[in-house]
Amino acid sequence: MSILELKNVHAGYGSAQSRTEVLKGIDLRVEDGELLAVLGFSGTGKTTLISLLAGLKAPDKGEVFFKDAPVTGPGPERGVAFQSYALMPWLTVEDNIGLAVGAVHAKASRAERKALTEKYMGMVGLTHARDRRPAELSGGMRQRVSVARALAMQPEVLLLDEPLSALDALTRAKLQDEFAEIRAETDATMVLITNDVDEAIFLADRIVPLNPDGTLGPDYRVALPRPRNRVALNHDETYHRLRGDITKYLMEAGEMRKARVTVASFCRMWCRSSPSKHRQTRRCRRPT
Amino acid sequence: MTVTLCSLWPTLINTAIGVASIDRDLVNVGRVLQLSWYTKVFKVVLPSALPYIFTGLRLSLGVGWMVLIAAEMLAQNPGLGKFVWDEFQNGSSDSLARIMVAVLTIGIIGFLLDRLMVALETAVTHSPSR
Ligand SMILES: Nc1ncnc2c1ncn2[C@@H]1O[C@H](COP(=O)(O)OP(=O)(O)O)[C@@H](O)[C@H]1O
Ligand SMILES: [Mg+2]
C-alpha cells in the first residue's frame, strides 16, 4: 500500500507575469514503511516537494493523497523536520520538544507527556542540554532538536528536508549513523531529502533523483543489507555500481540544465541587441 | 486623552509589523502541529512579536511624554510644563536658569522612563544575544 502519493502534481510560485514553475508532472508513490530518499541539486524544488507532501502548500495541478484520502492541509501524522530547523528561539530544548508532545498528545497526563519528552530528548542525546536555548546550541544539536520534535509527533510519515546538509562532514557522518539507529527503532515511513549520493545510499531503501527541470528521475532500489557499515560499503560491488549510476544520471541531468541556461543567455542577448522589439519579446526571458 | 491618542500609533503599527514578520517556518511548525489558538498566540506569535511591540512602546512613551508636557503648557494643568510656561511669561532675571533646570529635568525623566522600558523588555522578551 502506498501511504503518500503524488499524482501528476505541478507546483510553482508567483502569479501570471513573474510565475516560476518548480515541479512539473510529478508522479510519486511512497510505500508504507520505506525510507525514500529524494536526491537533487539545490534549487530544484526539493523543499517545495516536502511542502506538498506535508500539505503546507497546495499543488497548482494534480493531487496529493495520504492513505488514499486527498490531502487538504498539514497535520501531525505527517511530521516535518524543516531545512532551517525552525526551532522557537525563545524556548529551551525541552520546551521545543514539549511543544510538539503537548500539541499531539494533548489527552495524555502531565507525567506521560514529560516521559515522552524525555524519551525523544534521550533518543537524540540531548538530555544534558535540556535547559539551553537554540542560540546556545551547535548546528548539529539544533538539527537533533528538530528531528526529536518531529519524532515526538509520532508521525506515520516523517518528512526530513535536508536534515544534514548544513553540517560539517564529521558531524554529518555521526548523525547519519544516528539516523540509521533511529530508523531501526521506529518503523515510520520516511522521506529523506538530500543532496548527497553517499548519504542517500547509506540510509535509503529507494532513491529518486529530482531533475533540475522539475521532473522525477528513475527509481534506484538500494538492495544493501542492514545495518549498513560505512567502511564495509567502501568495498561493496553493489554500492559502487549504484553510486556510479546515480552520479552519472545526476551529472547528465545537470548538463541539461547548463545547456538550457546557455540558450537562455543567448536569448537575453538577442533581446538586448534589438531594443525596438524588446517589449514584444518579453517571452524570450523564459525559453523553456 | 490627547496623550493616549497621540502615543497609541507607534505601538499599534509596530505590533502589526511584528505579527506580520514572524518567521514563515515557525508558522508552518504551528500548522503541522495543529496548535490550539491559545498555544499559537502565547508560544509562537507573542514571543516573536514582543521585541517589535516593545520598540513601539518605547516610541509611544517618548511621544506620550512630549505631548504630556506640551498639553500642560497649553491646558495649564499643574506640572513641569506649566512651570516652564509660567517662568517664560514671568521674565525675571533668574527665570532662564529655572527654565533650564526644568528642561533638563524633563529630559532626564524622559530618559529614565525609556531605560525603565528597556529593563522591562530585557526581562520579558527573548533576545538572541542573551
Ligand atoms: N516562497 C517562494 N516564493 C517564490 N519562489 C520560491 C519560493 N520558495 C522557493 N522558490 C523557488 O523555487 C525553486 C525551488 O525552491 P526549493 O523548493 O526551496 O528548492 P530546494 O529545496 O531543492 O533547494 C527555487 O528556484 C526558489 O527560488
Ligand atoms: Mg530546500
Image: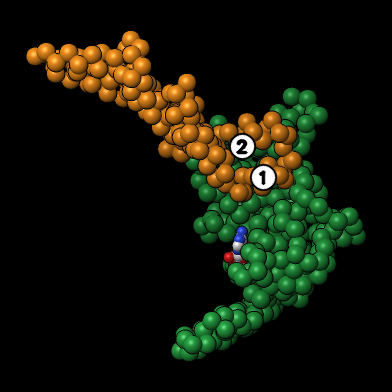
Point out residue B74 in the picture as x, y percentages from the top left corner.
33, 20
- Residue beneath the point at 61% across and 70% down: A17
The answer to whether B67 appears left or right of B53 in the picture is left
Provide the letter of the chain coloured green: A
Count of residue discs: 2
Point out residue A35 in the picture as x, y percentages from the top left corner.
76, 59
The answer to whether B93 appears left or right of A144 in the picture is left
- Quarter of the picture holding the N terminus of chain A: bottom right
Q: Please tell me whether residue B85 is drawn above or below residue B56 in the rendered image.
A: above
Q: Earlier in the sequence, mark 2 or mark 1?
A: 1
Identify residue type, mark 2: Val
- Residue beneath the point at 60% across and 37% down: B45
Residue identifier under label 2: B44
Q: Please tell me whether residue A47 is drawn above or below residue B60 in the rendered image.
A: below
The one nearer the camera, A4 or A262, is: A262
Is the residue marked by circle 1 packed among few (<14), some (14-19), or many (20+) residues within 10 Å?
Answer: many
- The quarter of the rendering in which ligand 1 is drawn is bottom right
Provide the letter of the chain coloured orange: B
| Res. A42 image quadrant | bottom right
The one nearer the camera, B21 or B122, is: B21
Point out residue A253 in the picture as x, y percentages from the top left corner.
64, 80
Identify residue type, mark 1: Val
